[in-house]
Amino acid sequence: MDQLFKIYRLTPEETLRIATLPNNPHNHDYEELIIAMEGELEHFIDFDTNTYAAPFVSFITKGKVHRVKPALKDGKCDMWVVRFKSEFIPEITFSLYSFYHNYATITTQKDDCFNRLVTLCEMMDREYNMPQPNLSIIKHLLSALFMMIENERKKADPENDLLKTNSITFKNFLALLENNFRRPEGVDFYAEKLFMSARNLNLICQQIMQKSVSELIETRKLIEAKNLLIYTDKTVSEIGFELGYNEKAYFTRVFKKRTGQTPTEFKEDMQKLIS
């Protein structure tokens, strides 16, 4: 996806068209949120397949291998699909990973709370389709949407089901990472803070996110780097130093290896998109 944010409404006609296309398990470089008012969704994720009937909320994190097959139910299908880059709302992206790593879909009820989720999607869609959309407004609406979804998640899932050792450790690691990712700290630092070995922490992260601790640290740094490149006037050197890279050349090399672009090239491309 070459945009920071995209939203569209899945209609019955589009659902039938999608059904005729090849649909193999895949991953993508953006986050995806689906809010279903009508219809069904067959979802393959984490090597398991389930079918959900609306109303439901489904969130697929970047990089997860999955496949979704929307379908009509009682002749209807009506779903909001929201896609966004990690750097669009970096302050909550990693918390989303911790909320949703155990599951992708939350079934809910068509009540006032769910209707408010739909209303927020409608507001984002209106802003998105303005001649000159304001991305700051969309960011705030999207953040509010996820806060309301998290409230629904807490009501739908008994707290005891979440109290699993690996899940708690992973969430604690992400909380530590959020407070320390700007520092030049490695795996041993986080393992020590969590009173465990670096090997075990790596195993948990690999199991949940299919990434090592080092990869998650670097990913969080790069999400923030992209955010700073897009929304501030800081130089590449200043951003690199702020994120624990002492040399501009090394920061540029790491950034290009992970994104395929130098920080300057990325900033120029994003400025074109935003403008």
Image: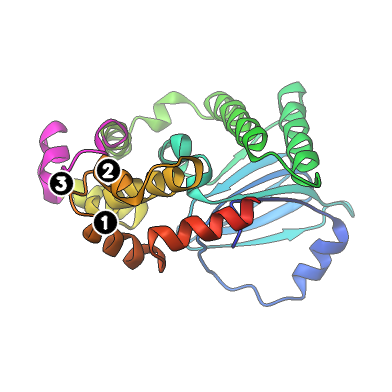
Quadrant location, the N terminus: bottom right
Callout 1: SS: helix
Callout 3: SS: loop
The residue singled out by tag 1 in the image is: 251
Say which label, 3 or 1, has the lower sequence index.
Answer: 3
> At x 69% / y 54%, what residue is drawn?
41
> At x 28% / y 55%, what residue is drawn?
215
The answer to whether residue 69 is visible is yes
Front-lying residue, 248 or 187: 248
The amino acid at mark 1 is Phe
The residue singled out by tag 3 in the image is: 186
Residue 173 appears at what percent x and percent y? 26, 37
Q: Nearer the viewer, mark 3 or mark 1?
A: 1
**Magenta segment:** 177-199
Is the residue under label 3 in contact with that under label 2 (CB below 8 Å)? Answer: no
The residue singled out by tag 2 in the image is: 243
- Alpha-carbon span between mark 1 and mark 2: 9 Å
Question: Up-down: is 235 above or below 71?
Answer: above
Residue 211: quadrant of the picture = bottom left
Query: What colour scheme governs how the chains and residues are painted in the rendered image of this protein?
Result: rainbow
Say which label, 1 or 2, has the lower sequence index.
Answer: 2
Residue 202 appears at what percent x and percent y? 20, 51
Q: Is residue 190 magenta?
A: yes
Question: Local crowd at mark 3 within 10 Å, few (<14), some, or many (≥20)?
Answer: some
Is the residue under label 2 in contact with that under label 1 (CB below 8 Å)? Answer: yes
Say which label, 2 or 3, has the lower sequence index.
Answer: 3
